[in-house]
Image (spheres, rainbow, N blue to C red):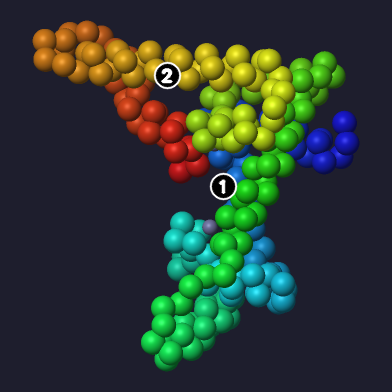
Amino acid sequence: MAVDRHINFFEMEKACEKPGCPLCRIVAHRAERYIDNMLFEHVSDRGFRKAHRLAGGFCDYHSRNLVSFRDGLAVAIMGRDILEDRIASFKKRKPWRPKERCPICLERERIEVEYLGFLAGSGGEGDEERELRRAFTGSQGLCAPHYGQLLELCRKLPGWIAEFHERKFEELKKRVDNFIEFSTYGREEEFSALSEKDQLVWKELARELRGTAD
Ligand SMILES: [Zn+2]
Ligand SMILES: [Zn+2]
């Protein structure tokens, strides 16, 4: 295994031990680290400053935590770029429009492609591949958006990954079917016989359908 695949392997194995989609967890963790780095390093990186400025800052989702950062100076320096551009277009009585996408979203997509490619290439019979399969099939598996992305990226998916996810989504659907059926009038007894996990399956479903990062 190449060095990069080793890193992917360890990170994936670690994420598989935690609840939720392992890729959502890796992406959330890396995005957090990326923002941290931004505050310490990227502020003086011209390429990054330019990309950030053309994007008009981070998207709603990735800028939601900026006010809680302790490094106010970095946030101010980056924010001033954006404000200058807004003032210029406001003076022309024109709405400002982004010319680039949020740099963290772009970074997130890069990480997704890297890890989905890693998973797609894990059909072999080496020790690490077997170990990965064991860890992965013991996890909750990919969320629906990430599994869909994997199918899009990879024509020949290793059989174990496809079988594991098809089974996972079928089982989830069965539990949702029961939840809906037993929620009707007169089925209270069957409903209360459901496990706590099954009574809250609607929450699990919502997370599975949009990704499980938070
Ligand atoms: Zn996911
Ligand atoms: Zn973003």
Residue 65 vertical position relative to residue 1 in the rendered view, above or below: below
Left or right? Give the position of 184 relative to 87.
left
- Percent x, y for residue 81? 56, 81
Q: Quadrant of the N terminus?
A: top right
Asked if labels 2 and 1 touch by Cβ distance under 8 angstroms, the answer is no
Count residues near mark 1 (Cα–Cα under 10 Å), then give few for <14, some for 14-19, many for 20+. some
Q: Quadrant of residue 49?
A: bottom right
Q: Position of residue 165 (x, y in %)?
A: 56, 20
| 128 sits to left or right of 138 | right
Rendered image quadrant of residue 158: top right
- How packed mark 2 is, by other alpha carbons closer than 10 Å (few <14, some 14-19, many 20 or more), is some
| Extreme residue in the right direction | 2
Residue that appears at 20% across and 18% down? 183
Residue at image coords 64%, 70%:
51
Residue 198 on image: x %, y % = 34, 18
Residue receiving disc 2? 172
Give the residue at x 81% y 36%. 5
* Circle nearer the viewer, 1 or 2: 2
Residue type highlighted by circle 1 = Ala
Direction from residue 114 to residue 52 in the image, left or right: left
Query: Farthest residue toward the left?
Result: 186
Labels 1 and 2: the sequence-earlier one: 1
Q: Which residue is mark 1?
A: 28
For numbered disc 2, what is the local secondary structure? helix
Q: Residue at x 61, y 62 (%)?
A: 103
Q: Is residue 92 above or below residue 100?
A: below
Residue flagged by tag 2: what amino acid is it?
Answer: Leu
